[in-house]
Amino acid sequence: MMSRIFLILILLFISTITSARENNQTIRAAQVFYSEASNYVEFEKEVVHMKALGINTIIFRVFGNGGDRIYKLANPGSKTGVYFKTSRSPVLGDLLGNVTAIAHKHGIKVFAWMTTRHATYGMAGDVLDREYSLPERQYKTLPKLDLFNDKAIWELQNLYRDLAKYPIDGVLIQDDFVMRHMEGFGAEAKINYANTFNRTLDAKNMYSDLELHPNDRVKRIVYTDEFRQFQDWKNKRLNLVAEKLIGTLKETNPKLEVALNVSYELFHKPKNALSWFAHDKTLARKFNYVAVMAYQDQIMKEMRINLYEAGDLIADNTRGAISVMGSPERVIMKIQTMDWDTRKELPSEEIRYIYQKVESASPDVGIALVPWEKRNFNFIKLQN
């Protein structure tokens, strides 16, 4: 049995390394949050426009959670769910088959962009995670799956199995595949923790000093050695769940390529990525691609730096990601095109500058424009 598992893991590793190299087309992607198309004729016109600008990959959102705009193409009977056929979730509309057929008709690949921990659709009880609220000093149930719960993972695998039945080219795993610093206190997590470390899982043991801003955001926190152990433990669990999801997808469709959304901190300050998200470089390497959320406007606001400093950081981030993943073809740098707070389009000059900084690190690295909002991006050299 062990030898069979080892063989499967080796085959997964080999496919991860080789699949990106076998694809001789550098990814130039449009990540679609929403489409105004009210029918497939209109959607095809949008795809033709993408093709004319050199887009060769569409990253298409196939889930809808609270607050997400529902595609006009859909005819939903629910406010949340997915855009593919499954019995494991409400179906907002079976769009993925037609979207993929239209894209393939024009020589464009399709990556289905799919949620993980937020795929709670109708589930409750022990399958949900709990967090420790620092302002309130108490535990609260989260609308996220507890990845220490085997039932939750099984339901997620079944959902992903149905997704992989479509003739898509890949899957981008949403950035909810993280366990933040004060998450991971669900019922099953507490049982697993006690069995592993022979002690009670208590959030108060995870920090020795805490100071909050007036708006209750963390101003300063000092983590304990037990917190570092806690994050390492959660990271190992994410690695295990990643293997299960990748295995499920590739078992159903061996040609599928799988990408993981990660924060820029992973290649800028990896200790922070582990502390804040339970992410590390080992996790990233399990995937065919790592999609780095190098969102320049967000970085400038978070770090209080200017565009040129953000550009240098993103170029360094690109080189760091290439070093970790082993080749530029396995890296997708995601460039922000919209202000997240105001929903206004960012200046073309800013987007062009960041695009050029990424290409200066390597012309072979993948690039995704996030989000795609029917803009004319012909100022960017998308075609290779």
Image: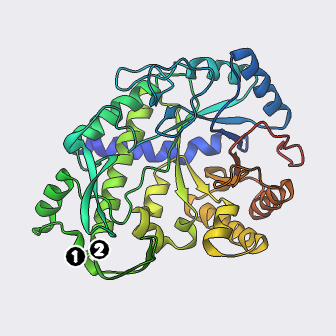
**Dot 1 and dot 2 residues touching (CB under 8 Å):** yes
Residue 342 versus residue 220: which sits nearer the camera?
342
Compared to 327, does 214 lie above or below?
Answer: below
Residue furthest front in the image: 214
Location of the N terminus by quadrant is top left
Secondary structure of the residue carrying numbered label 1: helix
**Quadrant of image for the C terminus:** top right
Q: Residue at x 66, y 66 (%)?
A: 319
Q: Is residue 1 in view?
A: no
Residue under label 2, please give it.
Answer: 227
* Badge number at residue 82: none
Q: Is residue 26 left or right of residue 293?
A: right
Horizontal arrangement in the rendering, residue 209 relative to residue 58 (left or right): left
Q: Give percent across and percent down for residue 303.
A: 62, 74
Q: Amino acid at mark 1?
A: Asn
Nearer the observer, 239 or 143 = 143
Kind of residue at disc 2: Phe
Residue 125 occupies which quadrant of the picture? top left
Helix, strand or loop at disc 2?
A: helix
Which comes sooner in the sequence, label 1 or label 2?
A: 1
Give the farthest residue toward the right.
379
Q: Dot 2: within a 10 Å radius of its alpha carbon, few (fewer than 14), some, or many (20 or more) residues?
A: many
User: Which residue sits at x=69%, y=36%?
Assistant: 57
Q: Is residue 298 above or below residue 54?
A: below
- Residue 219 lies left or right of residue 46; in this view the side is left
**Residue 205: which numbered mark, if any?**
1
Q: Position of residue 190 (x, y in %)?
A: 17, 58
Q: Position of residue 30 (x, y in %)?
A: 70, 40
